[in-house]
Image (tube, rainbow, N blue to C red):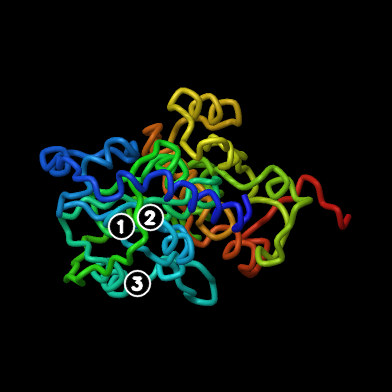
Amino acid sequence: MTELNRRVFMAGALAGAAGTLFAPLRTANARAEGTVSPLVDPAVLSELLNDPAVRVLECTSARMYAQAHIPGSVFTDFGKWRVKRNGVPAMLPDVPYLERVVGGLGVGPDTYVVIAPAGFSAGDVGVATRIYWTLRTLGHARVSVLDGGLNNWARMKLPLENRLNRPKPVTYKAKFTGEWLATKDDVKKALERKKPQLIDVRTPGEYLGPVFSPSTGRPGTIPGAVNVPQHWFIDAATGRFRTKAQLAKIHDAMGDTGGEAIIFCNTGHRASLGWFARHELLGRRCRMYDGSMVEWGNLKPPEEYPVAARIDLDR
């Protein structure tokens, strides 16, 4: 969907929801304080909007947020969640930096965070899952992704507003865990030991080799990896995740053995969607390789960090 179409869609949704824009919403403190699931339905979130323990972070775009957003939500710039490290772009920042980012959004250690993407494609849902993965890596337990994002929210004619919400910064202290983070050394060991399984969630064209991004250095994938394309995990019509049964069918059909795995893409954006679907929704243990192919494909010597292209158009 083009930016213009998105603008028209959101403007129409705002107009359609105008009658309920400032309607009082029932709080649900007990639900907010209990165990949360990785995905939250719009109808459930709509009952939590007045709860001070809940913070909705919208990761759409500044323009979309200015036009219409979930009442009380705060915009977060995805660019602030990733930095260049050791020459590799889009990497996980250091903990003190992330503590400032998270605290600046008014998120405390006990805040229930709901991340709302635009919901028009797997790519923008991946923005939400990357932020989700980052918060979980910081040790933040109470976080969910809004299933279907703003697309689904507006379709259900739930309330929207266009006033700017500025959060009061708080002090945030992380409890960092590397449980779901994989490095180049972890991938190298996986190649040597042939476990855990390597899963490439990019498109089949990138996996096989004919579709090539120069930023990855070399076409193809890490030898032995199976391809489970992440864009299959999202229903393109609604922006919602496939059911657990459907996700299992996709993974199993593409060679996922169900054991421990390391998931990668080009920069750890799409891989976060793969990690979310496999680990959080399917319950299959896995880690995400943050540097992914942009790091791996440019490492030297290349024979120690091999890349294989089943279809090499230059040969």
Using a 10 Å C-alpha cutoff, classify the residue at mark 1 as few (fewer than 14 neighbours), some (14 to 19) or many (20 or more): many
Where disc 2 sits, the SS reads loop
Q: Nearer the viewer, residue 52 or 248?
A: 52
Please determine whether, in this image, residue 79 is positioned above or below residue 67: below
Nearest the eye: 200 or 153: 153
- Horizontal and vertical percent position of residue 114: 30, 50
Q: Amino acid at mark 1?
A: Ser
**Foreground mark, 3 or 1?**
1
Q: CA distance from mark 3 to mark 2?
A: 30 Å
- Mark 2, residue position: 69
Compared with 278, 219 (above or below) is below
Check contact, mark 2 vs mark 1: CB within 8 A. yes
Q: Quadrant of residue 294?
A: bottom right
Pointers 3 and 2 in contact (C-beta within 8 Å): no
Residue at which label 3 appears: 94
Asked if residue 173 lies left or right of residue 10, the reply is left
> For residue 208, what is the image quadrant?
top right
Q: Which residue is mark 1?
A: 73
